[in-house]
Image: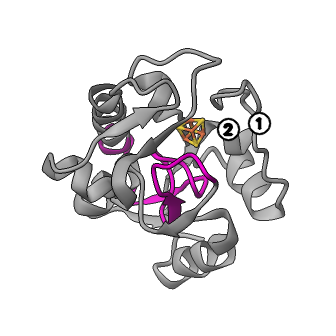
Amino acid sequence: MTAKILVSACLVGRPVRYDGAAKTLDHPNLARWRDEGRLVVVCPELAGGFSVPRPPAEIDRGLSGSDVLAGTARVVDLTGADVTALYLAGARSALALARAEGCRFALLIDGSPSCGSAFIYDGAFAGRKHAGAGVTAALLRAEGLEVFTPLEIAVLAARLESIGAA
Ligand code: SF4
């Protein structure tokens, strides 16, 4: 069985971050999965309607993606604009792609208000992190996908092995 993996576009070298940069992960597992055709690449923020570059954004008041999904938190950019609707649209688009491609797993850049799954920033644009997930990661998890950070790539590899999909 070959398991497909939803992966952040900036993680595989695409210059789609808010500042026009990528955040390329150079790791043999990722290179092998790419060569095996397992990777399903998505940038939820571009899918939601943003372009590059764009102002950085954070989830407000130290809340997290699950709060945004529940309608009790907003995503606000550095100019003060409420960009929650675009983040929700991007998350839904990523989920639709994952379902269409049969992905059970996702490997997403951490810290992003979309893709973060272990930590995000607290909404003050002061560089302060806290435990929590971004909007896309929270939605994927709520829909049953297993979401991993780049630091957990070995855990994802072991998980694939455990289900006979390595
Ligand atoms: Fe990378 Fe995700 Fe941000 Fe797109 S939304 S730039 S894929 S971290």
Marks 1/2: CA distance?
Answer: 5 Å
**Mark 1 vs 2: CB contact within 8 A:** yes
The disc placed on residue 163 is none
CB of residue at label 2: within 8 Å of ligand 1? yes
Q: Position of residue 87 (x, y in %)?
A: 35, 33
The disc placed on residue 10 is 2
Q: Amino acid at mark 2?
A: Cys
Horizontal relation, residue 82 to residue 40: left or right: left
Q: Residues within 10 Å of mark 2 (few under 14, many from 20)?
A: many
Q: Position of residue 98 (x, y in %)?
A: 37, 44
Q: Amino acid at mark 1?
A: Gly
Q: Does dot 1 land on a helix, a strand or a loop?
A: loop
Residue tagged 1: 13
- At x 58%, y 73%, the residue is 156
What are the residue bounds of the magenta stretch? 98-126
Is the magenta region chiefly helix, strand or loop? loop
**Quarter placement of the C terminus:** bottom right
Q: Position of residue 84 (x, y in %)?
A: 30, 33
Q: Which quarter of the rendered image does ligand 1 occupy?
A: top right
Q: Is residue 50 above or below residue 89?
A: above
